[in-house]
Amino acid sequence: MSRPVNTAELARSWVAIPSPSGAERAVLAAIEQVAQSCGLSVRRIAVDSERYDLLLGSEQPPRVLLTTHVDTVPGGPPPTLAGGVLGGRGACDAKGIAAAMLGALCDLRDRGTDRVALLLVVGEETTSDGARAAAGAMSPVAYLVNGEPTELRFVSAQRGALAFKLVAQGVACHSGYPELGRSAIHALLDALHRLRLEPWPGDPEIGATLLNVGSVGGGTAPNALADRAWAELMMRPAIAAAAVEGRVRELTGDAIEVEVRTRSDPQRFFVPPGRPAIVVGYSSDVAHLRPLGTPLMVGPGSIHVAHTDREQVSVAELEQARRLYAELCGELLQRDAAP
């Protein structure tokens, strides 16, 4: 029998451990300790020389894989657990989900079901390097259930991701004699203007392709032409990411360097018969985990408060998610075993 897991307290303890992308070791160590005390097998999957994912389960090869991420965006308020609500960075995106999945895994083990495992990855908020490492190191399963904040609604489709940096080089000179130089900022602004005016193609189900200019910098002084300028952008493609990237390069031209940080295509998911489904505007690790099995996506909490100082999830929803994950895994195992 597994040691009883209190979902809310477990999630609060993990939220209390900062784990921005790239600095996840402390929370992984805490998760390993809990998993071992519950009698779960623990496998580390190397991501780089310092970082790793965790695969928790039994010695039996899994047929259903629960999965979510333990890294977060930086910052956020300290954890709170009061009035039936868990608050803090990672409460719903996605340490609360990880706690609900671990609880479901223990519940399934106690019922004699051992063909389910839990994969907790790093790096989802940046480059999905954890998911890519796991996909290359693990054997395929029948189904994988990815946890993201969906208000416990199943997802039928999601946008992709194209994160990139634009870098413009110029020639500095006195602003009174612009003919002696070339402003990198002006060139960058022209390129950004073309990108913002572009009628990016969309998809009837997924919707429009989105573009966001997240940060901009460059130059040294207002009375000097800038010798360098940069901008970081995130696009949410509703079509193939490679096609969007190609058009970005055409619009920015040879004078602007395009440094792609991460790229993934839109995804479509299996939705169990009879379950209502939604389309979400964000991307996830599923694009990189898809080689492992047929993906589903569902989780507690709202994406509308993720990445904000209002991030929270109710304890009742975490417990509901725990029951849903256990029930869903049972259904998927039966589907996998059906002739």
Image (tube, helix red, strand yellow):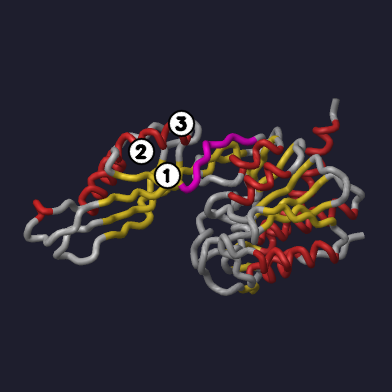
**Of callouts 3 and 2, the N-terminal one:** 3
Query: What residue sits right under mark 3 in the picture?
Result: 203
Residue 251: image quadrant is top left
Residue 58 appears left or right of 233? right
Asked whether the viewer can see residue 158, the reply is: yes
**255 or 26: nearer the viewer:** 255
Q: Which amino acid is tagged 2?
A: Val
Q: Give the farthest residue toward the left.
A: 176
- Residue 129, image x, y percentages: 59, 50
**Of callouts 3 and 1, the N-terminal one:** 3
Residue 260 appears left or right of 178? right
Relative vertical location of residue 201 with respect to residue 132 in this rendering, above or below: above
Query: Which range of residues does the magenta coloring cover?
Result: 261-269
Q: Is residue 203 magenta?
A: no
Residue 110 appears left or right of 29? right
Kindly identify the residue that appears in the image at 68 percent across and 42 percent down.
136
Q: Which amino acid is tagged 1?
A: Met
Mark 3 near mark 2, Cβ–Cβ under 8 Å? no
Neighbour tally class for label 2: few under 14, some 14-19, many 20 plus, Cα within 10 Å: some
Mark linked to residue 256: none
Relative vertical location of residue 152 with respect to residue 37 in this rendering, above or below: above
Kindly identify the residue that appears in the image at 39 percent across and 32 percent down.
201
Point out the frontmost of discs 2 and 1.
2
Residue 330: image quadrant is top right
Kindly identify the residue that appears in the image at 85 percent across and 32 percent down.
337
Residue 191 appears left or right of 289? left
Mark linked to residue 248: 2
Q: Which element is circle 3 on?
A: loop
Asked whether the viewer can see residue 152, the reply is: no
Query: What residue sits right under mark 1 in the picture?
Result: 235
Mark 2 near mark 1, Cβ–Cβ under 8 Å? yes
